[in-house]
Amino acid sequence: MRLEIASNKAVKYACLNFHYAKVLPTYSIAFSVFNSKQEWCGCVLFGGGASVNMPKKLGLNSGQYLELNRMALNGKQESTSKVLSIAIKLVSKKSPTCKLLFSYADKGQNHFGIIYQATNWNYIEDIESSGTEYYFKGEWKHDRGRYSWGVDFKKLPKRKKAGKHKYVYPLDKSLIPLCKSLSKPYPKQAVEVHKLNNSQSSEKVGGANPTQPL
């Protein structure tokens, strides 16, 4: 299995076809994932992150943190946890000023952060959301894409977003004690973490198996 810098075309295709959100987020570093058969498996994206409050509370400035904001994979990868482990190492090399990674597991998708637990991230917060999601085409969708649906979203069933689980991963050894001090017990799910081998986990990281973009 190998990862390499992804093209913009590959990133867009993976996010719109392999990830449940169907949204292309803002990102600064992206990697294409290839399995041992050299088949393209999708992309892993890191960006500056929408929230700056949490990194600032840890004493970090812009450029010293990144958010893992997408693992858009099609299921051909042998091990999702290995994909993330390799991606973390590459981020450390590509962004030497980055001291911390953070990410979220979407409770609305029944995600608990199993992939983060399998790769030893620190779980630090259960976040309640004040946002809204709408029921459209048979599923609950994030409100930020509502203007592209081509319908009057105000007439759709809606509900409060379920919130997220927040995880952090210190790249700088000096932050390890602080992250551990903030760490809480992992949220539980009916899947044993050590059995996470690939995309067959109950958390969605992939989808169908479309043609590889060039």
Image: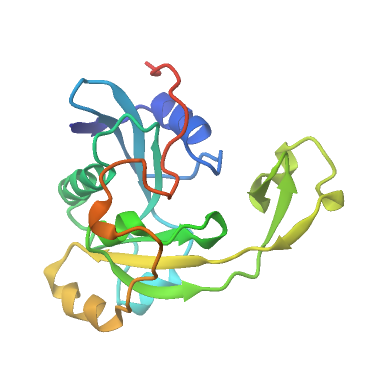
Q: Give the quadrant of residue 210.
A: top left
Q: Position of residue 101 (x, y in %)?
A: 29, 60
Residue placed farthest to the left in the image?
A: 173
- Of residue 183 and residue 193, the one placed in the foreground of this image is 193
Residue at 25 percent across and 45 percent down: it is 197
The chosen color scheme is rainbow
- Of residue 17 and residue 49, the one placed in the foreground of this image is 17
- Of residue 112 and residue 190, the one placed in the foreground of this image is 190
Q: Give the quadrant of residue 185.
A: bottom left
Residue at 31 percent across and 66 percent down: it is 168
Residue at 41 percent across and 42 percent down: it is 205
Q: Position of residue 196 (x, y in %)?
A: 28, 50
Residue placed farthest to the bottom in the image?
A: 181
83 sits left or right of 211 in the view = left
Q: Position of residue 30 (x, y in %)?
A: 33, 38
**In the rendered image of this protein, does residue 60 appear above or below residue 112?**
below
Residue at 79 percent across and 35 percent down: it is 150
139 sits left or right of 122 in the view = right
**In the rendered image of this protein, does residue 177 appear above or below residue 39?**
below
Question: Split into 4 quadrants, where in the image is the N terminus?
Answer: top left
Question: Split into 4 quadrants, where in the image is the C terminus?
Answer: top left
Q: How many marks?
A: 0
Q: Position of residue 178 (x, y in %)?
A: 23, 80
**In the rendered image of this protein, does residue 65 appear above or below residue 34?**
below
203 sits left or right of 6 in the view = right
95 sits left or right of 132 in the view = left
- Of residue 46 and residue 168, the one placed in the foreground of this image is 168
